[in-house]
Image (cartoon, grey):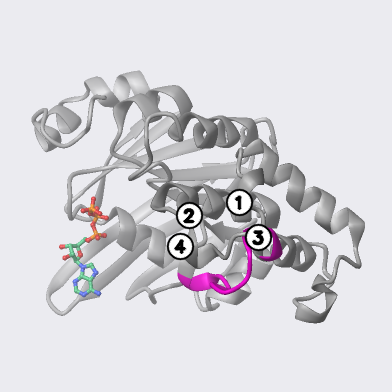
């Protein structure tokens, strides 16, 4: 059996008296895409925040490739291969789409973040950034400052940046939220393409049933912060716990 790339063990966080994530023990294998579902307020985003290091755990552990990373901060975890989709706040809003992508490609290649290198000095970096833009059909926006992108294009760029970083663990939080019907498939195709990388694992917080059906190898369900179900998509979707948790309301069957 393939070793776990990412594991959480009794991972817990309390906000005052409220247990938002409650002793979640779960392992994620390389080559697997796991959808994390649950009703609003179930703890999905908080679980992501605990894994990526945005918030500190009250108890429990997080391990990446066997190494205990519980006490590491976000950037230390990122350096070890934990990658969460970028948010615009992580970018340089005044720089263009292409320049932002180039910075991430450069960082991954271990050449460091340096604005001075942006003058087209490294053709390989530029070519890789341009290829990613083409795959997302964002070529026409290469020179546009990221602060001027539409919401849908910002979300696409977030995905492109994560792919440029190429972490061991890809974490996507509703990657197609707010996208138009013609934009979403481009992003879903890219995420599907990542599954071919059998040495990577992908976590996806998602409400849309069609996205889950098309991408997930496995579903875990969080309910009141606890792990309520875990298994193959068909079995989990049919389970009593999911039927009860959602009562047909919140998983968006598009
Ligand atoms: N910083 C915080 N301080 C206090 N309570 C918090 C904090 N962050 C989250 N919570 C609470 O923890 C619970 C889980 O929230 P979380 O955002 O993780 O749920 P979610 O499953 O991602 O929901 P949604 O699907 O609506 O995004 C909620 O009750 C929320 O109010």
Whether residues under marks 1 and 4 lie with C-beta atoms below 8 angstroms apart, the answer is: no
In which quadrant is the N terminus drawn?
top right
Q: Residue at x 44, y 29 (%)?
A: 182
Give the percent coordinates (x, y) of residue 241: 17, 32
Give the percent coordinates (x, y) of residue 204: 43, 43
Neighbourhood count class around disc 4 (C-alpha, 10 Å): few under 14, some 14–19, many 20 upward: many
Q: Where on the picture, by quarter, is residue 133?
A: top right
Dot 2 or dot 4, earlier in sequence = 4
Q: Is residue 86 magenta?
A: no
Q: Is mark 2 within 8 Å of ligand 1?
A: no
What mark, if any, has residue 154 been given in the picture? Answer: 2
Give the percent coordinates (x, y) of residue 90: 52, 71
Q: Which residues are magenta?
A: 89-99
What distance separates the C-alpha of mark 3 from that of mark 1?
29 Å
User: In front of the other: label 2 or label 1?
Assistant: 1
Q: Is residue 92 magenta?
A: yes
Give the percent coordinates (x, y) of residue 223: 19, 47
Pointer 1 residue:
141
Whether residues under marks 3 and 1 lie with C-beta atoms below 8 angstroms apart, the answer is: no
Q: Is mark 3 within 8 Å of ligand 1?
A: no
* Location of residue 223 with respect to 192 vertically, above or below: below
SS of the residue under disc 4? helix
């Amino acid at each position: 059996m393939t070793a776990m790339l990412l594991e959480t063990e009794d991972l817990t966080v309390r906000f005052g008296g409220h247990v938002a994530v409650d002793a979640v023990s779960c392992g994620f294998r390389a080559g697997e895409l796991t959808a994390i579902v649950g009703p609003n307020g179930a703890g999905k985003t908080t679980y992501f925040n605990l894994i990526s290091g945005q918030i500190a755990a009250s108890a429990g552990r997080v391990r990446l490739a066997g190494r205990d990373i519980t006490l590491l901060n976000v950037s230390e975890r990122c350096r070890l291969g934990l990658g969460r989709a970028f948010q615009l706040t992580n970018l340089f809003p005044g720089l263009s789409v292409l320049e932002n992508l180039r910075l991430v490609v450069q960082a991954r290649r271990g050449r460091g973040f340096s604005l001075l290198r942006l003058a087209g000095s490294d053709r390989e970096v530029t070519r890789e950034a341009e290829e990613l833009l083409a795959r997302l059909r964002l070529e026409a926006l290469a020179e546009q400052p990221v602060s001027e992108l539409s919401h849908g294009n910002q979300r696409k760029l977030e995905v492109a940046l994560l792919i440029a970083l190429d972490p061991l663990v890809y974490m996507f939080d509703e990657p197609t939220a707010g996208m138009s019907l013609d934009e979403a498939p481009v992003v879903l195709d890219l995420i599907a393409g990542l599954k071919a990388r059998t040495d990577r694992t992908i976590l996806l917080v998602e409400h849309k049933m069609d996205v889950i059906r098309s991408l997930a190898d496995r579903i875990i369900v969080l309910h009141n912060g606890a792990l309520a179900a875990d298994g193959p998509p068909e079995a989990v979707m049919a389970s009593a716990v999911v039927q009860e948790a959602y009562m047909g309301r919140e998983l968006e069957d598009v």
